[in-house]
Amino acid sequence: MTQQYCARLIPENDGRWTVEVPALPGCVTWGNTREEALERIKEAVELYLEVLKEEGKPIPADKSIFTKIEVAI
């Protein structure tokens, strides 16, 4: 069984990437490249969900919808 989650990638000033999964509070990591950050967040999500299972807590579905908006500046 698989589950999909939205991951938010944030480029940092030093060239690194921070990545978080908003549907899983506190599930955040980073990488030196986008690819590394995405690899690490997959591992983090798997561990996060494993802990939820061990604690008998439900696995949350990701109902996030991301869109860009345009505003005047």
Image (cartoon, rainbow, N blue to C red):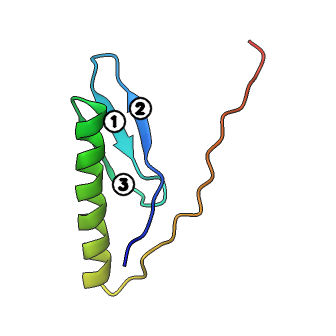
Label 2–label 1 contact, CB within 8 A: yes
Q: Earlier in the sequence, mark 3 or mark 2?
A: 2
Residue 14 pos. (x, y %): 27, 17
The secondary structure type at the circle numbered 3 is loop
Q: Return the residue at label 1.
A: 18
The residue under the point 39% across, 46% down is: 20
Residue type of the residue flagged with mark 2: Ile
Q: Residue at x 45, y 59 (%)?
A: 5
Alpha carbons under labels 3 and 2: distance apart: 15 Å
Res 27 quadrant in image: bottom left
Residue at mark 3: 26
Query: Which quarter of the image is occupied by the C terminus?
Result: top right
Quadrant the N terminus occupies: bottom left
Q: Residue furthest top?
A: 73
**Which residue, as the protein is rendered here, is positioned at the far right?**
72
Residue topped by disc 2: 10
Q: Callout 2: few (<14), some (14-19), or many (20+) C-alpha neighbours within 10 Å?
A: some
**Residues at marks 2 and 1, CA–CA distance in whole angstroms:** 5 Å
